[in-house]
Image (cartoon, grey):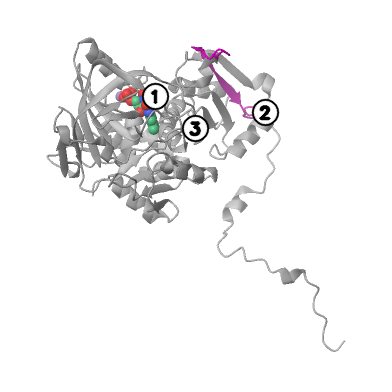
Amino acid sequence: MAKDLRAFIEQLAASSADQIHMVTRRVDRKFDITAIADRLAEDGRFPALFFTDVEGSSMPLVINLTATYERLALALGTSVPDMARVYGERQANPIQAETVSDGPVKEVVLKGDAVDLSALPIPFHNELDAGPYITGGVMILKDSDTGAQNAGLYRHQLHDPRTLGVYIQGSHHGGYIYRRNSERGAATEFALVIGHYPTFMLGAVSRLPGIGGEFAEAGALLQEPIELVKAETVDLMVPAHAEIVIEGRLLPDETRLEGPFGEWTGYYVSVGAQPVMHVSAMTMRRNPVYYDVFPAGQEHLVLGSLPRMGTIYRRVREAVPGVVNVNVPAHARTHCYISIRKTKDSEVKRAAMAAISTEPENLRCVVVVDDDINVFNEPEVTWAVGTRMRPDKDVLTIPDWNGPGDLLPSNWTYTVDGTHEPVMGAVMILDATKPAPPVQYPQRARPPQDKVREVRLEGLLEAFDPSLLRPPKTLTGD
Ligand SMILES: Cc1cc2nc3c(=O)[nH]c(=O)nc-3n(C[C@H](O)[C@H](O)[C@H](O)COP(=O)(O)O)c2cc1C
Ligand SMILES: [Mn+2]
């Protein structure tokens, strides 16, 4: 069976009862869905939520499906401590997509006036969002110079039942393709894919050299080729096993006000004139599941960070072969923790430099630790910073490293009269490693680790018996 959205939902439900929950009570698409997810997040819970009754839509909606590293690791068939390495290694071996003649995404074909995007359960997510947003859509565009298909995950405001907006950051390929076509006065065809196996979304978010290659990347992550079918009204190939595909055109230089929208930084930043997407067709399964990403929350961060972690791991390994692991924490995509088996003091800066050159826009704080520190255990990382770093020597700040402006609010200055100007931002490298051998540093105090690994907890811990604290009964007859 091809790996698709529903295959992953089933896999998840089978993996553990806590991973996915169903909500059958009717919810309003205006904030009910994200309010429930946010309430759970307050308690540190990020289960996938399957809503069966969204007001005004007959389609179920799944949010938070891709909100934790554990679930993304499950999709990759690996574990969290191994996922950056696995991701980096698979990236190096793309698997080309295959063309097929038909697929489940064609079970229903709607064209022209028959399309009504308001039939999709597109939510309003955060309080000041300008409207409902499609947050889990992968947009496919074709590079008119090479014919290569490019894919990226971008935000799409619902303007009206057959019109969407799109915000593409300047350096991303999607924007480049659209600008180039606009310069020539040509329209840009698009296909917007909603709902697939999580690795398809990860492939679309991966930062690849040159335009295109995302489907082959997704195939590598999936370990099987993505199957593609011809779109109905545009000259593009779309995944046969998607839930929903929306097709249409962007007209040259046509813009409409887009935003505000709560972004991955946790702020509303960008509002402005952005390209407009005119819809010509929608194809889908007979019973599609609408895939939604909770923006400005952990799901947005995790989905954006794993592809970067994989790339950072690969680049750092080129610079420092003794790299052990990399974590971009789920709650702070601006941070990166790298553990290395250090042999020379210079390896710290080399590792950090490799990481920041991979991810120049977003990283603010890179912490390098020794190999005895688990980078996925943040208290341990903080402990290493507190006990192995000397702030006067081990902090390196690189000014004017990124920006000016863009999505990070600290890359702007703000004035009391309400104006703001873009400025350059800096990055900080913290060396929280011990001096390289043969220098001796005090030993870490803990029980022997081989002894800890031998502990078997099953059946070890029993319910406490309070009678143990009562005085022993005196013998009868005294
Ligand atoms: C949930 C999520 C939402 C995203 N939204 C946007 C967006 O609105 N605009 C954008 O330019 N990039 C966005 N990205 C990042 C791009 O998908 C990513 O950088 C991708 O590699 C861009 O592909 P491209 O360079 O081929 O255009 C988002 C990523 C994630 C995970
Ligand atoms: Mn690309």
Relative placement, left or right, of 430 versus 109 is right
- Dot 3, how many residues are within 10 Å of its Cα: few (below 14), some (14-19), or many (20+)? many
Residue 118 on image: x %, y %: 28, 37
Name the disc covering residue 439, or none.
Answer: 2
- Dot 1, how many residues are within 10 Å of its Cα: few (below 14), some (14-19), or many (20+)? many
Residue 10 on image: x %, y %: 33, 52
Q: Quadrant of residue 383?
A: top right
Return the residue at label 3: 328
Secondary element at image label 3 = loop
* Span shown in magenta: 414-438
Report the amino acid beneath label 2.
Answer: Val
Secondary element at image label 2 = loop
Q: Earlier in the sequence, mark 2 or mark 1?
A: 1
Return the residue at label 1: 259
Q: Earlier in the sequence, mark 3 or mark 1?
A: 1
What's the distance in space between the residues labelled 2 and 1, CA to CA? 55 Å
- Is label 3 or label 1 in front? 1
Based on the picture, tell me whether residue 317 belongs to the magenta stretch. Answer: no
What's the distance in space between the residues labelled 3 and 1, CA to CA? 27 Å
Q: Residue at x 42, y 37 (%)?
A: 294
What's the distance in space between the residues labelled 3 and 2, CA to CA? 30 Å
Q: Are marks 2 and 1 in contact (CB under 8 Å)?
A: no
Residue 36 on image: x %, y %: 46, 45
